[in-house]
Amino acid sequence: MSDVSHVKYIIESLLFVSEVPVPISQIKKTLENLTSNQIRKALTELKLEYEIRRGGFYLSEVAGGYQLRTRPEYKDWIKKFIRSRPVRLSRASLETLAIIAYKQPITRSEIEHIRGVDSSGIVRTLVDYKLIRIIGRKEVPGRPMLFSTSKKFLEVFELKDLTDLPSPDKFTVTDQIEIEEEVQENKDFEQESNQVSASDKSDNIEIEEVQENKNFEQESNQVSASDKSDNIEIEEDI
């Protein structure tokens, strides 16, 4: 390294151009002459500078790496500027995500056993959002897929790793009651949806029956008209 005094600013530029958290090992591949401790020291100095300045961004240790992030207090202006639509998760999705986070690796049937309702659609949505991932298959009959949280999950919830998850023991009785109420609400909603779906199917069947009756009547009228035509021809022959 030709200019050691500029090391932390070189690291800062690497963090600035990266869209994902950068681990120390990746920085070390670029700055080959530096040790991990030297890189970590430079990162600590940068983090302190940002905290003293209290500018629009800060240095966060997240998802096994380091990332420059805008401060939460400026999120309203940022949203207005970039006009992006944030990903919104339903309560059922958050509930499913929490189950996966605390019980991983876990299969879909195990998730559904805990929730008490079908969760295939929610699991698919979480995979599409890249908040969870498939890590293999469970060695049981049928070999179902195993799901776990992803690196993006750590980024979104600003966690260094899974050990940063709050302990379930810290949840209060009130929290547990709210969770149980949400689970029951989800069950009631899905039951109502199934009833509506069954009603729609019944209506479709009735519509099909009416259409079949109309088609049958039309065919009968055509046959009747054909018979009349034949009778006219027979009379003319006579």
Image (cartoon, grey):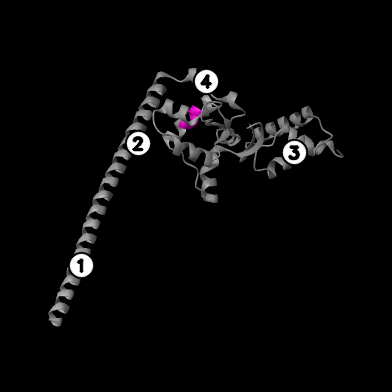
Ranked by sequence position, the earlier of labels 4 and 2 is 4
From this viewpoint, which residue is outermost toward the top? 169
Upstream in sequence: badge 4 or badge 1: 4
Q: Nearer the viewer, residue 124 or 51?
A: 124
Measured Cα–Cα span from mark 4 to mark 3 = 34 Å
Label 3 belongs to which residue?
11
Q: Is residue 161 above or below residue 74?
A: above
Residue occupying the point 45% across, 36% down: 120
Which residue type carries mark 1?
Val
Rendered-image quadrant of the C terminus: bottom left
- Nearest the viewer among 227 and 156 is 227
Residue 167 badge = 4
Residue named by callout 1: 223
Gap between marks 4 and 1, in whole Å?
77 Å
Q: Give x and y (percent) for residue 19.
A: 65, 43
Q: Can you give x and y, in whole percent of width and height, for residue 164 in the image?
A: 58, 25
Identify which amino acid the numbered label 2 is placed on: Glu
Q: Which mark is residue 190?
A: 2
On the rendered image, what quadrant is the N terminus found in? top right
Answer whether labels 4 and 3 touch (C-beta < 8 Å). Answer: no
Residue 163: percent from left, percent from top: 59, 23
Judge depth for marks 2 and 3 and give the one in front. Answer: 2
Residue numbers of the magenta segment: 96-100
- Bin the neighbour count of mark 4 within 10 Å (Cα to Cα): few under 14, some 14-19, many 20 and up: few
User: Closer to the observer: label 1 or label 2?
Assistant: 1
Task: Work out how far the residue at label 3 is from the one at label 1, CA to CA, in angstroms.
Answer: 87 Å
Task: Kindly state the secondary structure of the residue where label 3 is placed.
Answer: helix
